[in-house]
Image: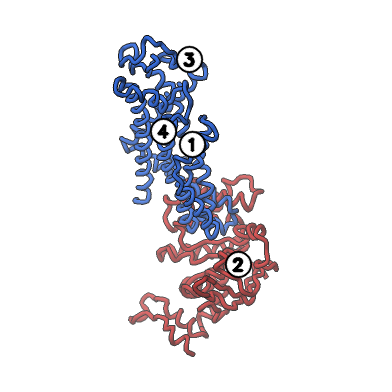
């Protein structure tokens, strides 16, 4: 088992009150597998993803209970030093907003080189490594593009650079937190397809975090649905999509717009009905 | 480093915008000329070359002569050539200005970075300290310190640097508070970068432009402080000329020999003006980055 989360609970505690962001969740991930965590904003999906390498600021966050077992070791008990080598080196992240995730004052080459030097100091020809990484994520003319500054690239290209940077460290797990939300629909499809190909090619596990059931079908082996800090349903993607059990899952799937389906208003989620069983 | 003919780095773009500002470029050229002059006369002082005349040679028969062909800016009460004294004293102002700003910048950046990056009680403590220092009338603090330590260029520089870093610290702290929440800093953290590296490699360069502007605008303040100290007799000691003590020497003869005060005064004013204009043009070039 690559990653196993057991009964994890996370609170945000401030002088003004306590929020139970993640409540007693458990899931696991095999090497090479792709898990999609689906839920609306505030459901705790990003918080649980950041918790994997203890990236939440404490305080206000507090890991109340549970274990995060990465290759059998509990992340919650690790030293900061060990965590730093896992971050990026073994578990890499990409985020929603590629335009602001790249440092504006450095070239693409410079930023990827930094990641490689940090986690793979044995690499001799860094430029060649960067060229390959950019080529892998489908950037045309990587030789020239690597000298560009982030603002010279389009949103889709910036996200590809982020993916290239994440993968250049050869992580075992790629955490993609809403990787396509800031991109337009055609680019979304390209990026998801890119991730799918990369996962087949590099055998990297992927944790895909999204609110959009529409994009997970092609890529995720399994799906976990989060609602209000809890996992309400978990299972193989095909089964969950075909036969959702929990009313929230059904509601989320109803929310996906389908081209030419039927002419009525798109469904919204009725929280009151969900909360009064 | 770039292969393209015009660099697209954010700093290159600021540079290009700066060079399209005529007044700013003129002021910067003025500063350059001044720096070259100051450096030249600093070298002259070292190798004891005098131009156009010995600044310390007293010719009592020629005292208080108005500007003429022999003495372009006239002579003082001891018959010393004012032009020579202004030129030979020029390096003191710039030297004090630059080095004091480097000292204050170093302290301000470190304090502001720590305060802004770590936040919380560290920030609270450091900022209250800054407030306390800012409450002191700094000029009297400087006067006291120089009176105790003795007047020398080094002491003046250190003391000016030690009291003037608070503004920089506040600026850096504010930049850090914003930048530490930025996505690329978060991304750097998820890559496993160390704190020091995040602070100096990821945050500081993004705060460099406004910091540079405030540094350039800080130089004239230090120059004016040095001139005031020299005028009051707490600065560089005679006979070594500085613009401040030339004015002080000329004060008793104000009504009869206006040139004793006007020319070193002009030198101080033009230097400060050149710094302010350059700094202002830089500020505009930096600000339009956000406006873009």
**From the viewer's perspective, is the residue at label 1 or at label 2 nearer?**
1
- Residue A52 shows in the view: yes
Which of the image's four quarters has the N terminus of chain A?
bottom right
Q: Label 3 belongs to which residue?
A: B49
Q: Label 1 belongs to which residue?
A: B100
**From the viewer's perspective, is the residue at label 3 or at label 2 nearer?**
3
**Do residues under tags 3 and 2 come within 8 Å of each other at their CB atoms?**
no
Please tell me which of labels 1 and 3 falls first in the chain: 3
Checking the image for residue A52, the label placed there is 2
Please tell me which of labels 1 and 4 falls first in the chain: 1
Q: Is residue B167 above or below residue B153?
A: below
Chain painted in blue in the figure: B
**Mark 1 chain:** B
Q: Position of residue A252 (x, y in %)?
A: 46, 79
Chain painted in red in the figure: A
Q: CA distance from mark 3 to mark 2?
A: 70 Å
The front one of A258 and B68 is B68
Q: What residue is at 36 percent from the left and 11 percent from the top? A: B62
Q: Position of residue B196 (x, y in %)?
A: 58, 50
**Mark 4 chain:** B
**From the viewer's perspective, is the residue at label 2 or at label 4 nearer?**
4
**Do residues under tags 1 and 4 come within 8 Å of each other at their CB atoms?**
no
Query: Which SS class for mark 4?
Result: helix
- Please give left or right for residue A252 compared with residue A136 in the image: left
Q: CA distance from mark 4 to mark 3?
A: 28 Å
Q: Share a chain, discs 1 and 3?
A: yes
Farthest residue, direction left: B255
């Amino acid at each position: 088992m690559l990653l196993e989360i057991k009964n994890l609970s996370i609170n945000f505690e401030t002088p003004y009150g306590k929020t139970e962001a993640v409540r007693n969740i458990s899931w696991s991930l095999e090497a090479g597998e792709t898990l999609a965590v689906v839920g609306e904003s505030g459901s705790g999906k990003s918080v649980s993803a950041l918790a994997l390498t203890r990236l939440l600021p404490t305080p206000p966050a507090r890991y109340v209970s549970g274990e995060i077992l990465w290759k059998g070791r509990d992340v919650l008990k690790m030293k900061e030093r060990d965590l730093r080598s896992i971050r990026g080196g073994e578990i890499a992240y990409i985020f929603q907003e590629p335009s602001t995730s790249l440092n504006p004052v450095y070239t693409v080459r410079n930023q990827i080189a930094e990641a490689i030097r940090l986690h793979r100091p044995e690499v001799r020809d860094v430029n060649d490594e960067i060229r390959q990484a950019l080529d892998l994520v489908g950037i045309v003319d990587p030789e020239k593009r690597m000298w560009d500054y982030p603002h010279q690239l389009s949103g889709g290209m910036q996200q590809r650079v982020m993916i290239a940077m994440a993968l250049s460290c050869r992580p075992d797990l790629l955490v993609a937190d809403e990787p396509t939300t800031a991109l337009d629909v055609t680019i979304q499809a390209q990026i998801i397809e890119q991730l799918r190909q990369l996962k087949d090619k590099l055998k990297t596990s992927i944790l895909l975090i999204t609110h959009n059931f529409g994009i997970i079908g092609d890529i995720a082996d399994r799906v976990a649905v989060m609602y209000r800090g809890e996992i309400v349903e978990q299972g193989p993607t095909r089964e969950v999509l075909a036969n959702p059990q929990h009313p929230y899952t059904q509601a989320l799937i109803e929310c996906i717009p389908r081209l030419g389906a039927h002419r009525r208003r798109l469904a919204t989620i009725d929280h009151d009905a969900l909360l009064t069983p | 480093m770039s292969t393209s003919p015009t660099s697209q780095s954010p700093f290159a773009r600021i540079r290009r915008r700066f060079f399209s500002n005529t007044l700013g470029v003129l002021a910067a050229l003025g500063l350059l000329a001044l720096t070259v002059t100051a450096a030249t006369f600093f070298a002259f002082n070292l190798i004891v070359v005098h131009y156009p005349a010995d600044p310390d040679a007293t010719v009592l028969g020629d005292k208080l002569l108005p500007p003429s062909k022999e003495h372009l800016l006239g002579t003082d009460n001891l018959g010393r050539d004012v032009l020579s004294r202004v030129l030979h004293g020029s390096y003191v102002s710039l030297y004090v200005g630059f080095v004091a700003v480097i000292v204050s910048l170093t302290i301000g950046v470190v304090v502001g970075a720590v305060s802004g990056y770590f936040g919380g009680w560290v920030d609270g403590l450091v900022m209250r300290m800054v407030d306390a220092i800012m409450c002191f009338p700094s000029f009297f603090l400087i006067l006291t310190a120089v009176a105790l330590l003795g007047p020398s260029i080094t002491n003046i520089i250190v003391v000016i640097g030690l009291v003037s870093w608070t503004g920089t610290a506040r600026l850096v702290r504010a930049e850090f508070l914003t930048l530490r929440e930025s996505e690329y800093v978060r991304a750097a953290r998820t890559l496993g970068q160390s704190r020091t590296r995040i602070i100096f490699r990821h945050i500081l360069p993004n705060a460099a432009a406004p910091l540079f502007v405030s540094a350039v605008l800080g130089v004239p303040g230090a120059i004016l402080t040095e001139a005031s100290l020299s005028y009051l007799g707490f600065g560089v000691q005679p006979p070594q000329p500085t613009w401040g003590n030339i004015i002080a020497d000329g004060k008793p003869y104000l009504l009869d020999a206006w040139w004793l005060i006007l020319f070193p005064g002009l030198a101080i004013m033009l230097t400060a003006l050149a710094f302010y204009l350059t700094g202002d043009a830089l500020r505009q070039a930096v600000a339009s980055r956000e406006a873009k």
